[in-house]
Image: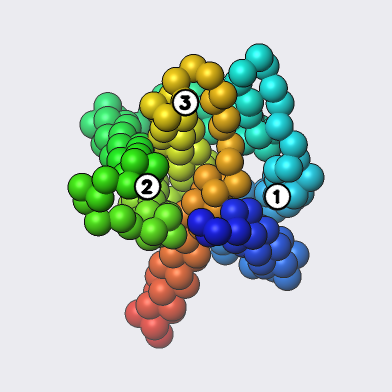
């Protein structure tokens, strides 16, 4: 993940596309439309290598779309009928993920070693579990992971480069996102399988 950025993302995307096309989409992505998911994955494959530049600010084209989808999910979430306590809990989870990502990456940049360096894949697995515990929905998990990484990466770039040369949407960030998202969805699918299995056993 850290030495060949983007390779892990490519593998996960291709695996998810195969799973959706072979009939596992409804289990992995609940009520989401598999066609839309395949379109998003195809967009990542096509656009992840392109950057949009505005003066000294650069952003990956696919990451810009990801952020837009995440913000739309956040807008829907804020308008939902969930109680304030549930919303605050999810926001606190997002803050935890953002802070953890910022601290780990700053440790990596500075090399001071104040805390043990946790591999990015370790953080990604942790983020996937947190997203799953926060909400079972694809839209909610997309929102949590995307916004957390957007803010975390932005803070890291601002801290390292100031306002000059900020670049958002690095392939290593996508590696973290895809591994976290895949972890959340696979764990959700396993939970659903167990629920259906024990439901059938109890009805016999």
Give the structural element (helix, strand or loop) at label 3. Answer: helix
x then y, percent, for residue 83 = 29, 30
Disc with the residue nearer the chain's start (3 vs 1): 1
Q: Mark 3 or 1, which is nearer the eye?
A: 3
How far apart are the alpha carbons under marks 3 and 1? 31 Å
How far apart are the alpha carbons under marks 2 and 3? 15 Å
Dot 3 crowding, Cα within 10 Å, few <14, some 14–19, many 20+: few
Disc with the residue nearer the chain's start (2 vs 3): 2
Residue 102 in view of the camera: yes
Which residue is situated farthest in the left direction here? 114
Q: Which mark is residue 41?
A: 1
Camera-side residue: 140 or 127? 127
Check the picture and name the quadrant holding the C terminus.
bottom left
Give the structural element (helix, strand or loop) at label 1. Answer: helix
Instruction: Name which residue lies at 44% across and 20% down.
Output: 162
x then y, percent, for residue 46 = 79, 45
Residue 69 in view of the camera: no
Which residue is situated farthest in the top direction here? 55
Instruction: Name which residue lies at 49% across and 17% down.
Output: 163
User: Which residue bears the numbered disc 2?
Assistant: 108
x then y, percent, for residue 150 = 48, 33
């Amino acid at each position: 993940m850290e030495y060949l950025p983007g390779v892990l993302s490519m593998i996960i995307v291709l695996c998810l596309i195969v799973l959706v096309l072979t009939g596992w989409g409804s289990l992995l992505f609940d009520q989401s439309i598999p066609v839309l998911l395949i379109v998003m994955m195809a967009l990542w494959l096509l656009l992840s290598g392109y950057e949009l530049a505005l003066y000294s600010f650069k952003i990956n084209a696919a990451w810009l779309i990801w952020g837009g989808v995440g913000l739309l999910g956040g807008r829907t979430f804020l308008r939902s009928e969930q109680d304030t306590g549930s919303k605050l809990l999810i926001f606190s989870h997002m803050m935890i993920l953002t802070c953890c990502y910022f601290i780990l990456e700053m440790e990596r940049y500075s090399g001071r070693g104040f805390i043990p360096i946790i591999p990015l894949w370790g953080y990604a697995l942790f983020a996937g579990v947190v997203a799953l515990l926060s909400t079972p929905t694809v839209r909610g998990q997309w929102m949590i992971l995307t916004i957390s990484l957007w803010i975390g990466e932005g803070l890291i770039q601002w801290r390292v480069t100031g306002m000059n040369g900020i670049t958002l949407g690095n392939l290593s960030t996508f590696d973290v996102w895809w591994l976290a998202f895949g972890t959340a969805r696979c764990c959700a699918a396993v939970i659903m399988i167990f629920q259906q299995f024990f439901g059938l056993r109890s009805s016999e």
